[in-house]
Structures are given as structure tokens and as C-alpha cells.
Image: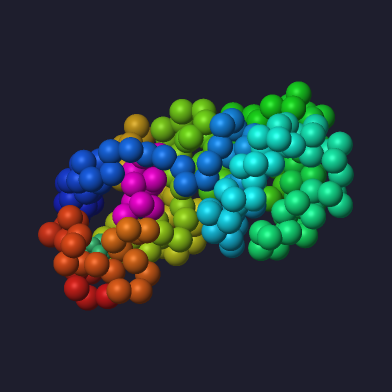
Amino acid sequence: MAKEGLKKRLKIIIEKLRDNYPEVKSHLEHKKPFELLVSTVLAAQCTDDRVNMTMVPLYKFKYRNPKAILEDGIDNFRNEIKSINFFNNKAKSILALCEILEKEHGGKVPGDMESLTKLPGVGRKSASVVLGHCFGKEDVIIVDTHLKRVCARLGLIENENPDKIEIELKEIVPTKFQFNFSMRIGEHGRLICHAKKPKCGDCFLSGLCPSYNKV
Ligand code: SF4
């Protein structure tokens, strides 16, 4: 019974999110799956703006595919991305990732969760980003810091572990809405439901939120 109430509330939340954030777009600029995959790995503990600023010109003029990064070599690649947090370890991951793409996938990004999460530096979150944006998968949920915070405040989840949150949400969010829901919740976290001082007074979900004016 409690779950039925939750699902009814969630249905309205999904509709309101769709109405308020009609466009679902990645903040990481990319023209193909390879670029989004590399940028997603580089964006861990770094801002999307910093990654875009560094990588967009490189994708255009230098790193058009995994082979180009491999041929340029780790030292040059590391030097190119040195403005990005943890560039040293990330450079190693990207080179190893490019090698696997070349050797096992013909230089292309695979379009399934299992293959993607075998790549160095790629967890379920990054894989879901690529699958949702580049392969049109609807049944993926991007569990990032914004989704965790906003879903917890809305009383949609009980767990803190990302894998468990993904399972919890997949039980209640209809399959065809999962990717868009997670993107829109993320956007709501960025714009309204901030970590510190959420703007509850401006929030279109206030009537549905048990944390209204309590954070
Ligand atoms: S009412 Fe406040 S706590 Fe709830 S989702 Fe909106 S901004 Fe976040």
C-alpha cells in the first residue's frame, strides 16, 4: 500500500520534471560516443566546464578516435589534459581504455553495459551516461551526487550505495522514463535543490516533497 502511494507521487514528480525540463541534454559537449566516453571519465571529481574547455578543441583537431590518442602517447596526452583534476591517473585509464577499444571493439565504443563497465575508469554511472545519450537506452539510471541528494529528500530512496539506489529506483520508475528521469532529477539538483540551501520556495515539487523547508 505504501509503495502504491509512492508510485502515485512519483508519477506526478515525473510529469512535473518533464514539463519543467523538457530538454534532456548532456553538460559534456560531444559529437560522438567516443568523445562522451572519454569526457565522462575525465569529469570525475572535475567540472564539466573544465573538461569541455580542454577536450572540445582536442577532439576537433587532434584526438578524433582512440588510435589518435594511442599514437600521440601517454606523455603528450597527459600534458594536454594537465588542467583536469587527477590528470595523471585519468591519462593512464584513457590510454588503457583506448587500447581495449582498438583491440576488442574495432576502435568503436560498445553499446552494452557489460562491455562498457569492463573498460578502465568506467563504472555504471559513466556507462549509463553513454548508453542513454549515445545509444538511446531508456532503462538506465545515472546515479550521481545530484540524483542521490534530490531523491533522498523527495523520499524516493532509502539507500546510500549507488548500486542499491539504482535497483531501488528501477523498481518504481517505469522503464521508458528511467534515463530521462535521472537526467531531469540531476538538473533539478543543479538548479533548485542545491546541496546547501535548496530553493524550496521556488521548487515546483514542494507540494510533493517531505523535506520542504526542512533542509
Ligand atoms: S522542496 Fe526543497 S528539498 Fe524538496 S525537492 Fe524542492 S528544493 Fe529540494
Q: Is residue 49 left or right of residue 25?
A: right
Q: Position of residue 12 (x, y in %)?
A: 17, 46
Q: Nearer the viewer, residue 29 or 97?
A: 29
Q: Position of residue 175 (x, y in %)?
A: 36, 35
Which residue of the protein is positioned furthest toward the left in this rendering? 207
> Measuring 79% from the left and 48% from the top, which residue is drawn there?
77
What type of secondary structure mainly makes up the magenta span?
helix
Q: Is residue 6 visible?
A: yes
Quarter of the view holding residue 66: top right
Q: How is the image coloured?
A: rainbow
As for residue 163 lying within the magenta part, the answer is no
Ligand 1 placement by image quarter? bottom left
Which residue of the protein is positioned furthest toward the top in this rendering? 106
> Measuring 79% from the left and 34% from the top, which residue is drawn there?
68
Quarter of the view holding residue 88: bottom right
> Measuring 59% from the left and 62% from the top, which residue is drawn there?
45
Height in image: 51 above or below 113?
A: below
As for residue 186 lying within the magenta part, the answer is yes
Q: Is residue 164 left or right of residue 21?
A: right
Height in image: 151 above or below 123?
A: below
Q: Position of residue 119 (x, y in %)?
A: 70, 42
Q: Is residue 18 left or right of residue 145?
A: left
Q: Nearer the viewer, residue 62 or 163?
A: 62
Total residue callouts: 0
> Measuring 74% from the left and 46% from the top, which residue is drawn there?
94
Q: Position of residue 200 (x, y in %)?
A: 21, 67
Q: Quadrant of the C terminus?
A: bottom left
Q: Is residue 170 visible?
A: no
Height in image: 147 above or below 176?
A: below
Residue range in magenta is 178-188
Height in image: 134 above or below 44?
A: above
